[in-house]
Image: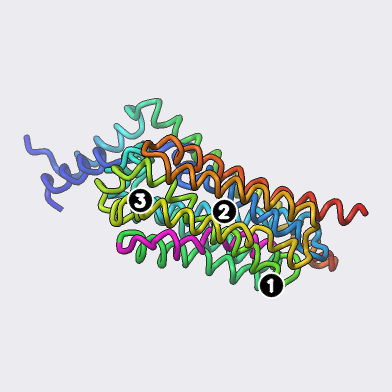
Amino acid sequence: MSDSTYQLTVETAAEAAPAGDVGDYVALLKPRVMSLVVFTGVAGLLAAPGHLHWLLAVVAVLCIAVAAGASGAINMWYDRDIDAIMERTRGRPLPQGRVAPDEALTFGIVLAFGAVFMMGLAVNWVASVLLAVTVLYYVFVYTMWLKRRTPQNIVIGGAAGAFPPMIGWAAVTGDISIESITLFAMIFMWTPPHFWALSLYRCGDYEAAGIPMLPVVAGKAVTKRHMLIYTLLLVPVGMAPALLGFAGWGYGAVALVLGLLFVAAAVAVMRDATDRSAKRMFGFSIFYLFALFALLIADRAIGIMA
Amino acid sequence: MAVTTNDLMAQDRQKAGTAQPDADRRRQRRKNIALAIVLAVFAILVYFVAIVRMGGGG
C-alpha cells in the first residue's frame, strides 16, 4: 500500500466512523412499534388455553420483542435512502450517519437468528418457525418487495404485524388454531385503516420519497373510501373471539361499541377535508387495538378466576 | 525527509492512544458495558431455561 493510499484510507475511515451511542442501537429496534407487537404477543400468550412456565413465557415475549426489533433494524438498513428524504424518519441513526449501514444490518441479522433459535430451544419450534416467517415476511415481502411497488403494500405487508398474537398462542399450545388465526385476522384487518390514516396527513412525505401509498397513487377520496370498507369489515372480525366462544359476551359487547366508534371515525374522515379527523382516527386506532387485546387478557383472567 | 507508511501508522496508533477525544472513548465504553450486560443476562437466561426444560417445567 502506498503512503498516499494509506493516508486516504485513514482519512476516509475517520470521516466515515459512525459516532453511534447505545441509544442509537436501541432506536434501530423501533421501540414504539415493538411495544404494540409485544403487547399483542403477550395477549396471544395469555389468552391461549394451557400452561407455560413463567420463565419460558418471559423468554417467548423477549424473543418476539427482539425479533420485531431485528426486523426494524433490517428495515432501517434497507430503507436508509428514503428515510433520509422523509421528515418523519430523517432523524433515524442511519440517515444521520450515527450508525454504519453494515453495522445495522449485522445487528439485525444476529438478533433475528438469536431470537428465532432461542424461541425454538426454550419454548417450541412451532412458535420459532412462526417467528422466522414473521421476520422473513417483514423484510423480504413487505420491505424489499411491496413497499416501493404497490399501494397495497400495507394491506399484504400488514400480515407481518399480525403474527405476534399467533406466536404467543403457539408458544403455549404448540399449534395453530382457528382462535389464533382470528387474532391474526383482527390485526390484519386493522392495519390498513390505521396506516392509511397516518399516510393521509403524511402523504407529502411519502410522495417525496416515491413510496406508492394509496393517497399518493389513488388520491385521498379513494383512500378514505377504502378505510371505511376495512373498518366496517373489522367490526365483525373484532367481535369474532366472542362469536367463536373463546371470549365472553362482555368482550363482544365492548368490541361492538369500539368497532362502531372506529366506523364513526372513518365516516368523520370521509367528511373532513382537513387532516384533523385522520390524526384523530390514527390515535383512536391504536387505542382500539390496545383495548381489544387488553379485554381479551381480562376476559381470560376472569374466566380462570371463575 | 520522506515519511514512510510505517511512520504514518505509528502516528495513527499514537493518536488512537493519546489523542482520541474523551467523548468517543466514553461512548465506546458505554457500548462495551451495554454489550457485556446483554451477554451476561443472556447467559443467565440460558442457564435457568436449561434447568426449567430439564426439570420438565416446559
Residue range of the region highlighted in magenta in the rendering: A149-168
Q: What residue is shown with label 2?
A: A66
Check chain identity for marks 3 and 1: say if they share one.
Answer: yes
Which of pointers 3 and 2 indicates the residue nearer the eye? Answer: 3
Of tags 2 and 1, which is closer to the observer?
A: 1
Which residue is labeled 3 in the image? A221
Q: Could you tell me which residue is drawn at 45 percent across and 65 percent down?
A: A156
Q: Amino acid at mark 1?
A: Ile
Q: Amino acid at mark 3?
A: Ala
**Residue corresponding to mark 1:** A178
Q: Is residue A152 magenta?
A: yes
When asked about the image quadrant of residue A205, the answer is top left
Camera-side residue: A129 or A200? A200
Q: Residue A266 magenta-drawn?
A: no
Residue at the location (60% across, 60% down)?
A: A186
Gap between marks 3 and 2, in whole Å?
Answer: 38 Å
